[in-house]
Image: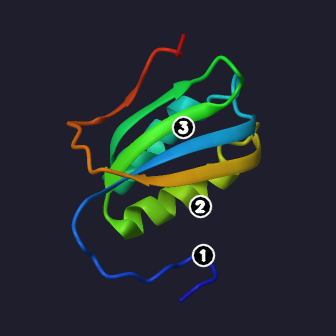
Amino acid sequence: MGKDEHKVADTGPLTKHFLVQGRVQGVFYRRSTQECAQALGLTGWVRNLTDGRVELKATGTEQQLYQLESWLWRGPERANVTVVECRAQTVELFDTFKVQANSD
């Protein structure tokens, strides 16, 4: 396995909540996250927060979520990610992965 690969057993769907800090707004972070999540087969949502962070929830396998979290640390080209917080959540099922309106 390569250094970014992570081998885990599939145990069914999981949901994780992420908060991403750094230069993550105004750099196509939400749209790029949506594209990554869809390519990985995840469902959920992503939105900007008023404090400058990006928030998302994603549902999928442990392997898919691990790959998303790895991508969140890089983000799109113009992003500069400094913190990615991740918490397991009660499983939520979504139809697709959407970009939501900004939080109030």
Picture quadrant of residue 61: bottom left
The vertical placement of 35 against 91, above or below, is above
The disc labelled 2 sits on which kind of residue? Answer: Ser
Q: Position of residue 75 (x, y in %)?
A: 65, 46
Which element carries disc 1, helix, strand or loop? loop
Instruction: Compare marks 1 and 3 and give the one earlier in the sequence.
Output: 1
Q: Position of residue 38 (x, y in %)?
A: 36, 45
Instruction: Compare marks 1 and 2 and give the one earlier in the sequence.
Output: 1
The disc labelled 1 sits on which kind of residue? Answer: Asp
Which element carries disc 2, helix, strand or loop? helix
Picture quadrant of residue 14: bottom left
Q: Position of residue 19 (x, y in %)?
A: 60, 41
The disc labelled 3 sits on which kind of residue? Answer: Ser
Mark 2 surroundings within 10 Å by alpha-carbon count, few (fewer than 14), some (14 through 19), many (20 or more): some
Q: Which residue is mark 3?
A: 32
- The residue lying at 41 percent from left, 47 percent from top is 37
Distance of mark 2 from mark 3, alpha carbons? Answer: 14 Å
Q: Position of residue 65 (x, y in %)?
A: 43, 60
Mark 3 surroundings within 10 Å by alpha-carbon count, few (fewer than 14), some (14 through 19), many (20 or more): some
Decide which of 90, 11 is in the foreground and name it: 90
Instruction: Compare marks 2 and 3 and give the one earlier in the sequence.
Output: 3
- The residue lying at 73 percent from left, 49 percent from top is 83
Mark nearest the camera among 2 and 3 is 2
Q: Which residue is mark 2?
A: 70
Distance of mark 1 from mark 3, alpha carbons? Answer: 19 Å
Q: Residue furthest front?
A: 90
Decide which of 51, 100 is in the foreground and name it: 51
Distance of mark 1 from mark 2, alpha carbons? Answer: 8 Å
Q: Is residue 101 left or right of residue 41?
A: right
Q: Which residue is mark 1?
A: 4
Marks 1 and 2 in Cβ contact (< 8 Å): yes
Q: What colouring does the structure picture have?
A: rainbow
